Image (cartoon, rainbow, N blue to C red):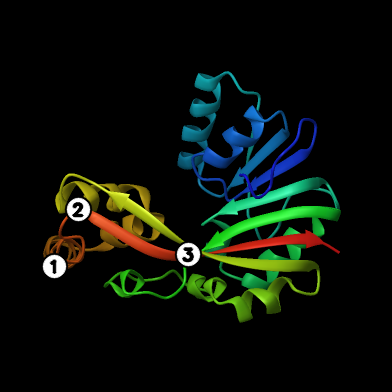
Amino acid sequence: MRTLAPEPGERFLDLACGTGAVALLAAKAGSDVVGLDISPGQLAKARDAAAEAGLDIRFDEGDAQELPYDDGAFDVVASAFGLIFAPSHERAAAELARVMRPGGRLAMTAWPRDAYSELGREYPEGDDSREWGRRERAGELLGDAFELGFEDGEWVVVADSAEELFELVKTSAPPVKAWFEKLDEAGRAEGEREYLDFLAGGELRRPYLLIVGRRR
């Protein structure tokens, strides 16, 4: 949020907002905030969080590849590890650019291909989300519409045990959750062993790419 520095009255879109963490921060800064996600369950949690915080945020159910907003509707767009999972990267990037006004600010985060991403889960059909984590590919998708900059970061989660961290990952990471729900009992047991081995010590460290831009 420090990168975007949302201001009072700005029109702010939290794209693929999940449970709305970014949207809440922007609303606390006084921005006029909309959150959009394709998951009704995640949106319900986001609405509950906003109500508990006493914040007026509109949360819409929708597809990042076909946004229900006018051209140039937003001053700021953010997406925290969300937009990257859209099946068509080109459609999602085009829609992102369409709804931003000239001079508008963008910040989004992406996972690259790393050891954690190679654990035995299935990725959904469509473009590989990890491609957003390559600067070259992000530039191809957004460079015509945005002046871009990139920063590398590290995401760290620490728990009391591998078992506690695995439970957090399994319940909060949509690709992992969806994969485990499809497995039979033997498959779940094998997958759990693989994750517990990887998360031994109760710590998960992952590199990520921060993509920032200004709409041309």
Q: Quadrant of the C terminus?
A: bottom right
Q: Circle 1 — which element?
A: helix
Q: CA distance from mark 3 to mark 2?
A: 20 Å
> Disc 3 residue type?
Tyr
Q: Circle 3 — which element?
A: strand
Q: Mark 2 — residue? A: 202
- Residue at the image position 15 percent from the left and 49 percent from the top: 161
In the image, 138 versus 189, the foreground residue is: 138
Q: Position of residue 107 (x, y in %)?
A: 65, 55
User: Within 10 Å of the Cα at label 1, are there few (<14), some (14-19), or many (20+) other Cα atoms?
Assistant: few
Question: Which quadrant of the structure image shows residue 86?
Answer: bottom right
Q: Position of residue 9 (x, y in %)?
A: 80, 31
The reply to whether dot 1 and dot 3 touch (C-beta < 8 Å) is: no
Query: Which numbered disc, 1 or 2, marks the residue that appears first in the sequence?
Result: 1
Q: Position of residue 130 (x, y in %)?
A: 48, 73
Q: Mark 1 — residue? A: 190
User: Within 10 Å of the Cα at label 3, are there few (<14), some (14-19), or many (20+) other Cα atoms?
Assistant: many
Please state the total of marks drawn on the protein image.
Answer: 3
The reply to whether dot 1 and dot 2 touch (C-beta < 8 Å) is: no
Q: Mark 3 — residue? A: 208
In the image, 15 versus 43, the foreground residue is: 15
User: Within 10 Å of the Cα at label 2, are there few (<14), some (14-19), or many (20+) other Cα atoms?
Assistant: some
> Disc 2 residue type?
Gly
Q: Nearer the viewer, mark 1 or mark 3?
A: 3
- Residue at the image position 32 percent from the left and 55 percent from the top: 177
Q: CA distance from mark 1 to mark 2?
A: 19 Å
Q: Position of residue 80 (x, y in %)?
A: 54, 53
